Image (spheres, rainbow, N blue to C red):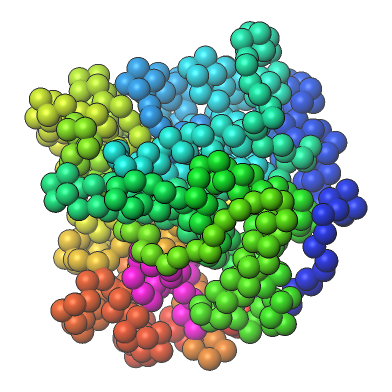
Amino acid sequence: MAEKITYDVDIGTLEYALSERDLCTDELNKRDNTLLGGDKLKRELEDLSRPDVDKDLHINLKPNGIYIQWDRVAVKQGIKDWFFMVRVPFWGGGDISPDEWLKISELAEKYSRDDDGSPSIRLTTRQAIQFHRIKKNDLIPLVRELIELGRTILNACGDNVRNTTASPVKSGIFDANALAQKIGEYFQLPLEEHYKIFYPEFSSIEKEDSHENNSEKFQYDPLGLPRKLKIGIGGYFVDQETQQEIRCNAPDILTNDIAIAPIVTNKKVNGWQVYIGGSLGQKNRKVTFPSLAGALGIFESEKDLMKGLDSIVYVQQQIGDRKNRHWSRLKNILYKKGLEITGKKIEDVIYCEEEFEKIRDAGIKWFGDEIKKLGVDFKLPVEFDLGKVFRHHGWIKQHDGKYSYGLWIENGRIKDSSHIGSLKKLVDEIVLQVQPNIRLTPFQDLLLTDIPESKRTLLENILARFNYGNYSALRTNSLACVGLATCPLAVTESEKFLNPLITELEQDGFGNLEGVNIGISGCERHCSRNVRFDISLEGKTDGEYQLKLLFGEQDKNHLAADLIDGEKKYLRRIPQNLAASVIRVLIKNYIENKLPEEKSISLFHQRIGMAKVIEILKTNEVTKNLMQSAYELYAA
């Protein structure tokens, strides 16, 4: 039986008194080393006599866009193989020019490796690029080459505003990418301090040429933010084939700390609705939970919007918990105050979606009043559909008459040893011959943009020559995070497990079944946004996963839920070799019993309810033995 976790929350007092707070170890290290690590980090990185850096500097690597890691498989044999992951943020996903992409590909060839030793580029759900398994002696040279390319890795990780994501689709109504660029630049950490560590000579040149006005930047505390803060922007475009106006929620914006959706009237943006409090991460054996953002209000001008964003981040910086990192996100402030205002305990609402949202909304109302005290002006929110969580695969006609092509990349892994072919060579060939600009999508794919009609056939011929295409809907709509052996947080495989899992389900004939997709995460942080998929597998321990199911439309305000009956939780630890069998039972039941209007398995599950799903799993010969193991309701 798993350890039982109680959900009492000590509300405490939220005050604007940062200096009077107790600080956790990471905060103390930020204070002692400076946020970006300064001279101490520079000396450690230049010391090639050891493969790592002092542990107290790990927190300082992150805002510089770097994680220190080790091979999680090799460590089982007693080998601590240290390396680094470098993440390059692309505000709004790009744009990346052809020449820039080819340079990125060259850098991957030179420095970055997948677990199998192949040169690798890894796309992320936050529209960034990751270089994996970077050895210490290659770290500074790689960062310097990126700086010379005009790309900084600052803000890609760490306790700051992270890479701002946005709808990647080209639009003549609302340029989400341009707004992401503006927000990204506004919340960027001090470049000068970053350059001093990695490229002092470049720092001097930049200082001479710089016209940067720091008064037009967010003023970070010396310790940065209490925890990371993520911003996502929805899109709005006209389908050039149907002339229909469409909202694009490709970034799944409500999963962010701050979400922004344009208000459009007569094809003109006249405001932005802002939502706050989203975040999908949890922590085993800690009082944590995923949450979707709720509506704060409407900001009628871009100036008001930027002031509003500044104030939201400022209040989070001032009152976010710096002692308990597991309760230091913006959502935690909202839920703490919501519980305080309503007088409820978290265990009373944690598994009731409607009541949980009421707690969040009470906190949002309080938070809105707080930022109004700072002179922020906004109107009451209105309710509207945020749009479909588009993948943007295949051909899309742009508003300017050119075309985009959404190139599906399984799990965002671009390498030539992929089971679907030489993807790295394929992308390089497309870029060389077709010369598209590139945007990274929130589904770890590439959107090749600005392609003239005269080059469409050329692109299609290249795809055919590389035998690219004809992949099932189940495969192209499913997703996994990196998982083992690279991620230090993962407890089991995810990226490497998705292909065999999908292959087995395809062999059962489920590949092109309408309305089924799968998200896999190697741990409970949900970096693949798996709890927003119809079927979610969450790593619990090596080779075991918890099943969570979505009960409701995937594009709406629902999260995949634990399977709970009374005081018991089920299917918390499914062996990897049985995962396909469990999913097969669910899919067969969906096929046999769905109504004609139920276009997804999550809508079907919403109708029949969780109790019926549990009953089916308890009585099915394939799953009934697994259902004999039940866990405490509040088990981590």
Residue 74 visible to the viewer = no
Q: Which of 221 and 583 is in front in this view?
A: 221
Residue at the far right: name it: 20
Image mark count: 0
Q: Is residue 557 magenta?
A: yes
Q: In this view, does 210 lie above or below 526?
A: above
Segment colored magenta:
541-564
In which quadrant of the rendered view does residue 610 lie? bottom left
Q: In this view, does 506 lie to the left or right of 10?
A: left
Kindly identify the residue that appears in the image at 77 percent across and 51 percent down.
318
Kindly identify the residue that appears in the image at 33 percent across and 80 percent down.
605
Q: Is residue 449 left or right of residue 332?
A: left
In which quadrant of the rendered view does residue 339 lie? bottom right
Placement of the N terminus among the 4 image quadrants:
bottom right
Q: In this view, does 173 lie to the left or right of 340?
A: left
Residue 327: horizontal and vertical position, in percent? 70, 61
Kindly identify the residue that appears in the image at 52 percent across and 14 percent down.
148
Residue 538: horizontal and vertical position, in percent? 48, 63
Kindly identify the residue that appears in the image at 59 percent across and 71 percent down.
361
Q: Which of 311 and 318 is in front in this view?
A: 311
Q: Does the magenta stretch include residue 439?
A: no
Residue 274 visible to the viewer = yes
